[in-house]
Amino acid sequence: MPRVLFIGDLVGRPGRTFVSKNIDALKRHAGADILVANAENAAGGFGLTAPIAKELTEAGLDGLTLGNHIWDHAGFDQDIDHLERVCRPANLPDQCPGKPYLIIEKDGFRLGVITVLGTHFMNIKASCPFKKADDLMRELEGQVDAFLVEMHAETTAEKMGLGWFLDGRAALVVGTHTHVPTADGRILPRGTAYLTDAGMTGPYDSIIGCTIEPIIAKLQDGMPRRYVVASDNVQLWGCAVDIDPKTGLATHFESVCIKENDWGPAFV
């Protein structure tokens, strides 16, 4: 059965380097056939650029998803249509550039990848994620063998709601955005693997990936601060799912955590 490894938000150089330099080791460790990562914090902690997207896909990632920081880097709106393995959140306005989904094919197995934004506290214009996910899955029926649906959202209720809404239709519904991994991963009654938040891949001696002191200061006085990506205690968090290609549903789910020193010289 094909196994998909979903990697939580890549944060800055530490996160993306940890992944890009260790793709083969990651595949061996997770036994993964397909690797998908959220890359919306890969460029300096905020957004993505075309060179970094190419770096990650050339290293071996099969698909990159994005979120509310999608347009943080000037010019990315001109580049995204040329990045074959990158998709934007599907429920952005239709006129936005970028692919609303990916179809990743490996050894005859076709995985549809859809990301939707939550609509609570996200500060970006997006339509109803439930309707958009439903519409796209109906549109792609027959073109894929299984679906991975990511919800990039602030609230746990929205993510849980989408998991139950798509139970029995998606192989995996996984949340991203908070950078904090949750411990509620499981397979729902009708066969959809679910995880509220995959966490981040980046420096964990930090506050959600950034250096600690400026954030503590801002939390106390409310004054603006420059956020800088931290560097210490790099960890990969995500999840792995085995998928029955006949049903398109999950047969096994596990959370994944790999630390930079887990295997010594095998990792950076």
Image (tube, rainbow, N blue to C red):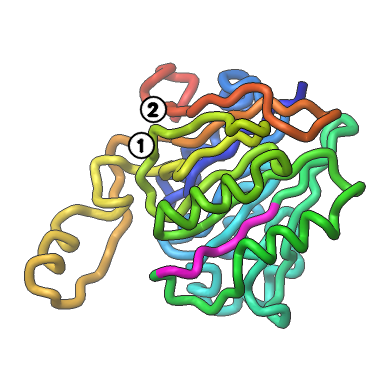
Residue at figure coordinates x 35%, y 45% from the top left:
180
Residue 234 is tagged as 1
Would you say residue 219 is visible in this rendering? yes
Q: CA distance from mark 1 to mark 2?
A: 6 Å
Q: Secondary structure at mark 2?
A: strand
In this rendering, the answer to whether 50 lies above or below 92 is: above
Residue at figure coordinates x 77%, y 26% from the top left:
244
Kindly identify the amino acid type of the residue bearing the numbered disc 2.
Lys
Residue neighbourhood size for the residue with mark 1, other residues' Cα within 10 Å, grouped as few (<14), some (14–19), many (≥20): many
Residue at figure coordinates x 63%, y 25% from the top left:
27
Kindly identify the amino acid type of the residue bearing the numbered disc 1.
Val
Give the side of residue 129 with respect to residue 155, left or right. right
Give the side of residue 61 with respect to residue 84, left or right. left
Q: Secondary structure at mark 1?
A: strand
> 192 and 253: which one is in front?
192
Tell me which segment is drawn in magenta: 114-120
Would you say residue 17 is visible in this rendering? no
Q: Report which quarter residue 218 is drawn in.
A: bottom left
Spot the residue most to the left: 221
Q: Quadrant of the N terminus?
A: top right
- The tag earlier along the polypeptide, 1 or 2, is 1
Marks 1 and 2: CB-CB under 8 Å? yes
The image position of residue 35, as x and y in percent, is: 65, 37
Residue 259 is tagged as 2
In this rendering, the answer to whether 161 lies above or below 32 is: below
The image position of residue 76, as x and y in percent, is: 61, 73
